[in-house]
Amino acid sequence: MKKNLKNRIALIFAFLLVCLYGIIGIPSGFTGKALLESMTKRIHLGLDLQGGVHMVVQVEVLEAVSDETDSALARLQQDLKDAKLTYSQIYKPQPLTDDPVTHIKTGKPEVIKVEGVPPASASAVQSLLDQKYSNEYDVSSSDNETAFTLTMKPLVEKALEDKTVQQAIETINDRVNTLGVSEPKVAPYSLGANQILVELPGYSDTDEVRRAIQSTARLEIHAVIGTPFPDEQSALAANSGALPPDEELVHYSGISGTDPDQVYVLERAPVVSGTDFRSATPGTNQNTGQQQVHFTLTDEAGNRFYDFTKDNVGKPMAIVMGGRIRSVANIKEPIHDQGEIEGSFSLTEVEELSKLLRTGALPASLDFLETRQVGASLGADSVREGVTAAIVGVLVVMAFMLIYYRSSGINADLALFLNLVILLGFMGYSHATLTLPGIAGVILTIGMGVDSNVLIFERIREEIRAGKAASAAVDQGFAHAWVTIVDTHVTTIVSAAILFLFGSGPVKGFAVTLTFGLLANLFTAVYVSRVIFEAHLNKLKPGEMVSI
Amino acid sequence: MLPGIEQRAGNLGSSKKKLIADSLDKWRNHVELFHGVNVDWLGKKWYFLAFSMIFSVAGIISMGIHLKKTGDIVPLGIDFRGGTEMRVQFKNQVPNIDKIRAAVMAEGIPDSSITTFGDASNFGGASNNEVLISLPEQTNEAGLDVGRQKIEQALNGPYAGDFTIRDEQVVGPTVGRQLEGQAGRAVLYSLLGMLVYLWFRFQLIYGIAAVVACFHDTLITVGAFALTGQEISLTVIAAILTLVGYSMNDTIVVFDRIRENLRLTRREPLTILVNRSINQTLSRTVLTSGLTFLTVLSLYIFGGAVLKGFSFALVVGILIGTYSSIAIAAPMLVAWQQWRAEKGNAVSLPAAKRSRA
């Protein structure tokens, strides 16, 4: 079967070339540097080897829900007014509140209540609610039909939350791209609900990243009630100890965030917020020479804003970002969907504000759950140490196999070398990321891969001792060892698969190299080793034994 | 040179080569003679049990002590316990730790822990002037980054320009809890998955014996971490999962041989058959474990500080994993069969459900 053998050897070589291509593509040159370059284009280095910033961000999706119910509330007010139906209150019984110490947001923002409906209009209110709001809200009424409760449907709420996370990802991506990082990664974080993973390789300034991302925080315009107070106590005292449910206290920090603290009383429901802004650009007032921000709203938001500003000319409104007031401006005239925000801003402040308004299309605020940064020097050290350990491991194993199994040791060493090439080839084709535990996975693959060879060779030795001829011994060796090889590889791949599902970045890298290495080993130990043995057997004289 | 002398010189050269080849052969034959080994492994099972109990108990005791001291059974890495950690490298010698702590306290951080972070893998080389500054977990996410900033400010005062930050990590309580849950589930599912696979390929009792052996290995490895005071991070959990896989491998090789022998001889007492199976696979076991151990040892020595915990878990795990296949899994099989025999049930351990060539 010499032709068969030649075919098989050709197949192996072809496969080898395919893998090499996966590793280095078509290199521009053959110097060490050029090869390394082509390789790193296909096999990416993880953050722990390149250095970089890694962050996990929580999206406060309840805020988006709260926004949505706020606008539903405003629409409902309008609808009831248009239908000339009276009521005493319309509000959210458990609005979203922020614990000032733990910053955990609690509340049930998905519930709206209408109270004080006169019995005569009860059925009219019911049919209005059913008509306009029952798609998204479950409507229920109190026993005497004077109060109605709207609760957002769970499916609708979930869809909204998913959309919010998606929008957050897009906006953070835009923001992060302005930092000039190559290959940033912004993606949903699999280990938690509504969490986003941000990875910036080669970047080291965590503060700047936080600032860039943080500045996509929520932006809203609220109506201001009364005058500012120096602190919260005096604000409460002036309001007889407690605020009504539709008002809240917010601190003022100015555009740069360094102005002295003041506390304003604002209407809780914002007039317009984040997604309502279509664009914003800095400009100068022709007449006064003052810096101003020129903004445009969406049509629907524009209508709401017009109603609000028409009723409140001469009164102030607050621009709130990230839960703090950035600017308070007086409403000069009714604004439809285009307007100017004016104040004694500096040029940089006005540009900052425009940028915030433009990219501030984030419907929810972000919490930083985890920040990691690996310096480039540590990354380089890790690469050096990992590769050294790998080389030492490979050399030790190769030397041992050569000494212990004589010429068959060459077989094992070739298989080992092939394993590494195939493993790297797999990684190159799948654009996998190599991490430090990934290098450890490669080292482990070397140790476990050689196990297959040991199993086969020991079996062959047994068969030879039992008196079988060379070719029969090889056959039997492979046949018996095959079962065990499959069993052991499957169990390790099972645990690697679980690691891949449950692990984060570096651990995933380990699972990937381990699995690829074991798959490569299945191929080399059984197919390639067999072919090399057969080639060797062909050369043997009759009666001569294999060197093992 | 006289031809006679040259010739002798040549003979000396080739006889040296022959000497080396001869001693290599002798060594090979000696090691190959593993095949003649006939140790009564099952007879020693009480020694094995005692050995395992000593280490397990030692491990459990140190875990208990650690639990009392800190509320966790082992030192947890920052992945799980949360908090802030910074590795700072100084250009020259590390300045006085107390001075560093004072500087950090002056910025308003009272509870920092500062330790020198020597790299023992530098083969006797001095620690590379590194310091590990860590802060405990914060209860709220918002204050999370403040500590890190303050430490950087503190260092920039007296030591500006003298240090580089090698890496820094800030982990909040939410993520820490998530990871803990994930890690625990991963280990559990892994063991379950293997139990099912072994049940499918062999019989349930094989699966149980193997899982008990793996559990024993995990217990002793985690105990080793408690004893030596090393941290368990996410990568260490990955190493533990790997050693579970490795221990399974090893156990399966012995089980495969037992299964094959059961098919060949039905009359042999189980004890003798199992002993023979172990002896037959001994050369493979020693070789593979030896080689895998050497590669992992290389990782421990040369692989750097970041992988220290990981490679330590593997070094311990591979040794214990090999041991457990012979000392725990095999005796369990025999003990179960004997227990069933005493109860008057079927006496011979059935071979696998499906027979394969």
Image (tube, rainbow, N blue to C red):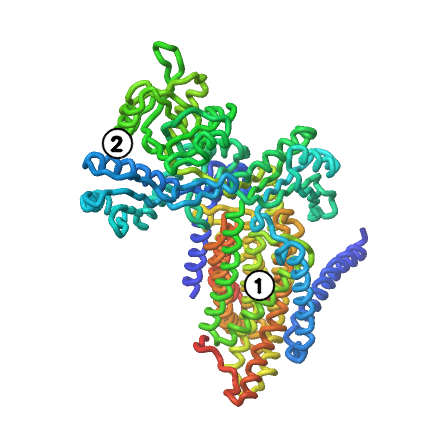
Disc 1: CA contacts within 10 A as few (<14), some (14-19) or many (>=20): many
Label ID, residue A408: 1
Instruction: Tell me where residue B305 appears, x and y as whole percent.
Output: 64, 47
Instruction: Identify the mark nearer the N-term, 2 or 1.
Output: 2
Foreground: B343 or A340?
A340
* Residue A334 shows in this picture: yes
At label 1, the amino acid type is Ser
At label 2, the amino acid type is Glu
Instruction: Tell me where residue B7 appears, x and y as whole percent.
Output: 77, 57
On screen, residue A322 versus residue A203, left or right, reads left
Q: Chain of mark 2?
A: A
Q: Chain of mark 1?
A: A
Above or below for B234 versus A261 = below
Q: Residue at x 63, y 31 (%)?
A: B153
Label ID, residue A300: 2
- Displayed quadrant of residue A70: top left
For the residues beneath circles 2 and 1, the answer to whether they share a chain is yes
Disc 2: CA contacts within 10 A as few (<14), some (14-19) or many (>=20): few
On screen, residue B7 versus residue A119, left or right, reads right
Is disc 2 placed on a helix, strand or loop?
A: helix
On screen, residue A257 versus residue B224, left or right, reads left
